[in-house]
Amino acid sequence: MGDEQWILAMNHTQLAALKATNEYTAKFGLVLSDEDTALLLNERSEVLKKERRVEFGEGILPKLAFAFCDSPYIQQDNYVETLARLQEIFYFYKNESLDEFTDDELVEAMKELFDGPCQGSLDYMEDTGLQKLAKKARFGACYDEAEEDEY
């Protein structure tokens, strides 16, 4: 299989996996159109380039859709925008945490922050809660919560 065929096959796999989330997320009133999925996959490519990451398989978008679809802070009118931003935040913090967390661990931490102390604020989640998580990953036992105010 040539490179171009392989890329087309990967795109088809990612598209199918993302579209399949609709079967579950529709229970929460959240559905992605064909246009939405194409937009999200295009943004995925852009953020992977920006963060200098490579990803194989279905990608993180289906996991994000499944994890966040029951959030009280996500409705159909902000669903695509929220998924796009969650994806961007996810890849940024995979790098910031030096890949110390599995995809599932990072998604779970994001969901807990988003629905908990951040009350649906992506900016607050990104700038506060996930910063702490990334520092702990980078500095481990050397990281002291008391020093956080100095940053």
Image (cartoon, helix red, strand yellow):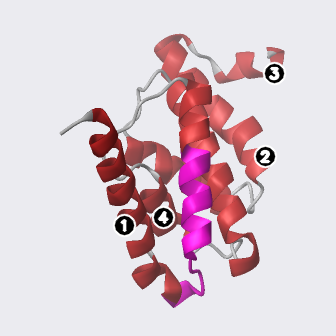
Question: Where residue 123 appears, x then y in whole percent?
Answer: 79, 46
The Cα atoms of the two marked residues, 3 and 4, are separated by 31 Å
Query: In the rendered structure, which amino acid carries the disc numbered 4?
Result: Ala
Specify which label sits upstream in the sequence, 3 or 4: 4
Question: Badge 3 is on which residue?
Answer: 149
Which quadrant would residue 16 be assigned to in this image? bottom left
Question: Where residue 142 appears, x then y in whole percent?
Answer: 53, 10
- Residue 107 visible within the image: yes
Query: In the rendered structure, which amino acid carries the disc numbered 1?
Result: Ala
Question: Badge 1 is on which residue?
Answer: 16
The vertical placement of 94 against 82, above or below, is above
Q: Residue visible at 74% across and 70% down?
A: 78
- Please tell me whether mark 3 or mark 2 is closer to you in this view: 2
Neighbours of disc 4 within 10 Å: few (<14), some (14-19), many (20+): some
Magenta segment: 27-44
Q: Residue visible at 66% across and 66% down?
A: 80
> Which residue is at the front of the view, 98 or 81?
81
- Residue 133 visible within the image: no
Query: In the rendered structure, which amino acid carries the disc numbered 3?
Result: Asp
- Please tell me whether mark 3 or mark 4 is closer to you in this view: 4
Question: Badge 2 is on which residue?
Answer: 124
Neighbours of disc 1 within 10 Å: few (<14), some (14-19), many (20+): some
